[in-house]
Image (cartoon, rainbow, N blue to C red):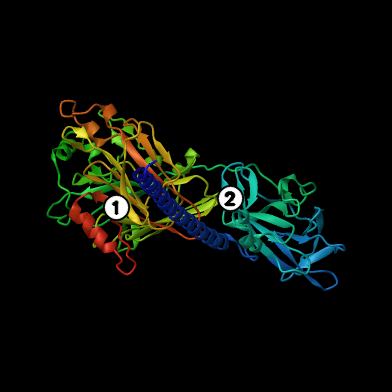
Amino acid sequence: MNQRNLTFFFTVFTSFLLIQIAFQYFDDNNTRELVQQQEARRITQEKELVASIRSKTATTSQLGVVDYLKPDGNKGMGIRIDDALIISREETLPDNVRILGNENQQLVQKAKTPQFVIYAPQSSTPTQLPDLPPNGRYDLQLLTLLPDSTPTVTLGKWQDGHFSLVASELTEDKRAEFLPAGEAIAFLKVNGKYYPVGTYAPLTEQFTPLRQLQGLITVFQWPERETIRNTDEEQFYLLENEYVQVVFSTKGGAIKEINLPFLSKSDHESVVREIGYDRQIENESPENAYFPSSSYLSYDSTTSKPVTHTKGKLGGYYPLLRRDFHTKSKRTQKVPAKFYAFNLISQFPELAETNYSVTHFDGQTITFVSQQTHRQITKTYRLASSGAPYVIEADLLVDGEDNDLWVTSGIPDVEIISGATAPTLKYRMTRQGKPEVVTESLPQSGITNTTTTPDWLCNSNGFFGVILDPLSTIPAGYKIQTVSAQQAPSRLLALSDADSTLKPSEYTGYQMLLPVQSTGAPLKFRLYAGPFATDILNQVDAFYTDDSTGYNPD
């Protein structure tokens, strides 16, 4: 090999080696950055979990811990369940005890387990306790009550028939603080009250439902598990301003209608203009052109009371969401509550149909509450100020079981653009600190995504739509449901065949959903429900932009 070839070979080899070193350097840097990002994400998630555990853990007083007196005058601590008292098993047990503050009532031994003793009045009837539900996710409060020790409470989880400690999801150095100090009684919150439902032994890591323990039937009874029943008549409540008319339903505590006023002398703030279809439906099918579409209650500021209206106004509004449809044969096709906006749905269909009570209504805000067997759901709505047109602000509080809960966008009605419908489904996500808007393809049967965390969802018919914007932290994921016109009809089906350019099968709609969970505090949402006019959207963005934090709803 001559000198020239040797030099060429050496140069190529050196260049190749340097390139390899450079690639290795960048790979190492990228790997290091990825590891750092993953570690930062893990630390953040762990901090959030610790905060969640603390916020969800009950106090000893909430679990009924009280002082009691022994016959010798000494005091102890026990758990009061109605007339019964549970205390830790000791070597020497008193024959009777009296709860401090209720010394006139003597409690005697009624039942024993290997860890606990239950006292109750001699002639008392058994206390009704709930069963552990077979499905769903529930928080359990683990109360450790050891002799001569301060009671402690830690958090457990009951999910689909299996028990686990929430602390097991933490790293070892964080875990100890949230583990039971000894034998514990597990409590489940039902209808706002805590009831004992099981025992937990840390040494064997064994959880035993209370119902399976022998000898407790003299003090406790377990009825059959209740189911959600809905027999009350659906009622509708109205909030409105110069931009939007919102009709709320007691079924689901959700939004049944969102109606946008047309630009007129009386509604000069609106940017929505009436077109031929609107006038044609009002003339040919007036029963589909009332706003609201049925009787409703509004707030009378002069009497400070709700007032009932038997009928809405004929015409003057654009129905953003699909509504109950009256056919030419005078038959009514009702839109199911699961397709209302801001309803909660799960694997159990009856949840969407649950009746809520209105606990506050003043014309500016409305609050719905549903007390269910293993949770309480509270929803509060208000219309934003005039600086943020077409915006509905909503708070959602889930107190209790929160497994598989999704909040809905509702289904926009059809708009025909150039002879075709133009539904559009979008979401925004933040990738490496930068916002990215993704347009989803229209699914044939639906989509379930469990990994992406959208900043917001947008369900549009082309001109109008709903933007569902979670302001609180929610779990990752989103869903899209494909809904036929038979399930949720369009008002355009009222048009005569000669004037309708589409077949009924082409009026397919879509609903988008976000997952929610119980956090101990209300989850805040912002719903934009109106026209996708650039100047209006910019006005809303400007209203909610916070320069001090850099927040922009975009």
Badge count: 2
Where residue 291 appears, x then y in whole percent?
A: 25, 45
Q: Nearer the viewer, residue 554 or 272?
A: 554
User: Does residue 549 lie above or below 370 as drawn?
Assistant: below
Quadrant where the C terminus sits is bottom left
Cα distance in 3D space between marks 2 and 1: 32 Å
Q: Nearer the viewer, residue 119 or 403?
A: 403
Query: In the rendered image, which residue does mark 1 sit on?
Result: 528
Give the residue at mark 2. Answer: 138
Secondary structure state at the residue bearing disc 1: strand
Three-letter code, disc 1? Tyr
From this view, report whether residue 277 is shown above or below residue 453.
above
Residue 242 makes an appearance in the image: no
Relative to the observer, which residue lies in front, 33 or 144? Answer: 33
**Mark 2 vs 1: CB contact within 8 A:** no
Q: Nearer the viewer, residue 182 or 311?
A: 182
**Place of residue 336 in the rendered image (x, y in percent of width and height, measured from the top left):** 39, 38
Based on the displayed image, in which of its 4 quarters is residue 63 positioned?
A: bottom right
Q: Earlier in the sequence, mark 2 or mark 1?
A: 2
Q: Residue at x 73, y 55 (%)?
A: 202
